[in-house]
Amino acid sequence: MHLVAKLDDIGKPAWIALTAVSFMIWWPVGLAALAFTIGSGRMGCGCHGNVSWRERRERWRAMRDEWRATRWGGYGAAPSTGNAAFDDYRNETLKRLEDEQKEFTGFLDRLRRAKDQAEFDQFIAGRRNSPPGELSQS
C-alpha cells in the first residue's frame, strides 16, 4: 500500500487525479477507484459513522440556512426591489412562511415519534402476551 500512503500524503487532488486517469485507462478501473475513494472516506463523502438520517437532515438544513444568511445577509434580506412597501411585505411573508415551516416540521417530528411509540407499545404488548420461550414473528 505504498501508493496509497503517497496519495494520502498529497490529499484529495491526488485521489481525484487517480480516479480521472483510471477512467481514461479503462472505465471499470475508474469505477473501482471511485468506489474505493468514496468508500474509504478519503473524499469526505462516504459513511458518516453512526449518524441518523434526522441528524444529517438537520446538518443540511443548518448548512442551507448558513448559505442563505451569507448570500443575502440574513433570512428574507433579499436585495431591495426599490419599492419599500413590497420589500416589507415580502420580508413579512417570508418570515411567516419560515415560521410555518418550522411548526410543520415540528408537527411531523411529533407525528413520527407518536407512530414509533405506538409501534413500540404494540411490540411490547405482543411480547408480554406470548408464552415464554416463543419469539415474536413481527
Image (tube, rainbow, N blue to C red):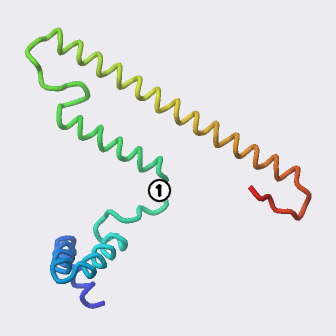
Q: Is residue 10 above or below residue 60?
A: below
Q: Quadrant of residue 137?
A: bottom right
The answer to whether residue 120 is visible is: yes
Q: Tell me if residue 82 comes above or below residue 42 in the rendering.
A: above
Residue type indicated by callout 1: Val
Q: Residue at x 8, y 15 (%)?
A: 82
Quarter of the figure that contains the N terminus: bottom left
91 w.r.t. 60: above or below: above
Q: Position of residue 118 (x, y in %)?
A: 70, 40
Question: Which residue is the extreme one toward the bottom?
Answer: 2
Residue at the image point whose x is 35% and y is 26% from the top: 98
What secondary structure is marked by label 1? loop
Crowd tier of the residue under label 1, counting other residues whose Cα lies within 10 Å: few below 14, some 14–19, many 20 or above: few
The residue tagged 1 is 51
Residue 40: x %, y % from top left: 36, 74
Q: Quadrant of residue 64?
A: top left
Between 24 and 118, the residue placed more toward the observer is 24
In this view, the residue farthest toward the right is 131
Residue that sits furthest to the left in the current view: 82
Q: Quadrant of the C terminus?
A: bottom right
